[in-house]
Amino acid sequence: MTASITTLVLGATGTTGSRVASRLAARGHLVKAAGRRATPVDGAEAVRFDWYDPATYEEALSGADRVYLIPPLDSAAPAGIMLPFLEQARASGVRRAVLLSSSAVPAGGPAVGQVHRALPALFDQWAVLRPSWFMQNFTGDHLHARSIRAEGAIMTAAGEGRVAFVDADDIAAVAVHALTDVQAPNADLVITGPEALSHTDVATILTEVTGRKVIHRQLTYEQMRDHLASTMPPEYAAMLAGMDRANAEGAEDRTTDTVQRFTGRRPRSFRAHAERTTRQPTSTLKAAD
């Protein structure tokens, strides 16, 4: 990859987008950091981009050879928005696309799975990242993190189903390789942490690390769906609650070697993530004042 190649990073202020943009820029790559507010990222060119405003597409794509794709948030059917953009991207000169999807969504599956299925026909160089559930969901600004701070509880319909939660730093590290390696993966990559944990296990680890009691409050599918629907569109809430139900049945009880293969190191454990987060001065694991 030469220094003249430019990568467009969508969602550049988000959980993985910010990490991808900063890692690329730190390595000397040309980066266009795209977001609704064109927020500056060190070493990158800030550019405005809004999935729901096609007028922002042309400037964002100008000069870009590669693109890191974050689907529009809270959309249960993003293909109708994303595919026209991807066709425009190809026409404008983008040659490689790396899509952030989910381990729970295969090619042709619901939501971003439709984009996954279409991607290989649009680009000769591509990758679909399918990470497990983020560790940051418990320590950032996700619904789980907020309920931990407010109530000392994680609420799910996942029962005792286990998930190999993954650190967003590890996802970003794989993404950078997928964007910059001489040969694109041309594959979908399931990305997990090193061990599968139940949400009860997660609550126990958070209790031990923070010294504050955290429990796992198990809900039914309907209770979880209605709980989520208070903060997002009903169809998206139903989809997420359905993923919890699938997790209860063992859908995410697996680990992969993707992080090791691409980065040469093991992925970070949840305990290590929690310990690192609580050492930060503004730890979001602490209870709200």
Image: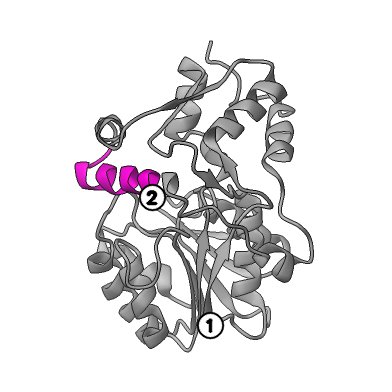
**Residue 28 horizontal side relative to residue 65, left or right:** right
| Residue 229, percent from left and from top | 25, 35
The residue to which callout 1 is attached is 186
- Is residue 244 part of the magenta span, yes or no? yes
Residue 28 visible from this viewpoint = no
Location of residue 231 with respect to 3 vertically, above or below: above
Query: In the picture, which quadrant includes the N terminus?
Result: bottom right
- Identify the residue at image location x=44%, y=47%: 247
Residue closest to the eye, 31 or 120: 120
- Mark 2 or mark 1: name the one nearer the start of the chain: 1
Q: Is residue 155 above or below residue 101?
A: above
**Residue 278 percent location from the top left of the image:** 70, 27
Q: Where is residue 4 in the image (x, y as percent from the top left)?
A: 63, 80
Give, as a single range, the part of the protein colored magenta.
Answer: 232-245
Q: Mark 2 points at which residue?
A: 246
| Residue 160, above or below 193 | above
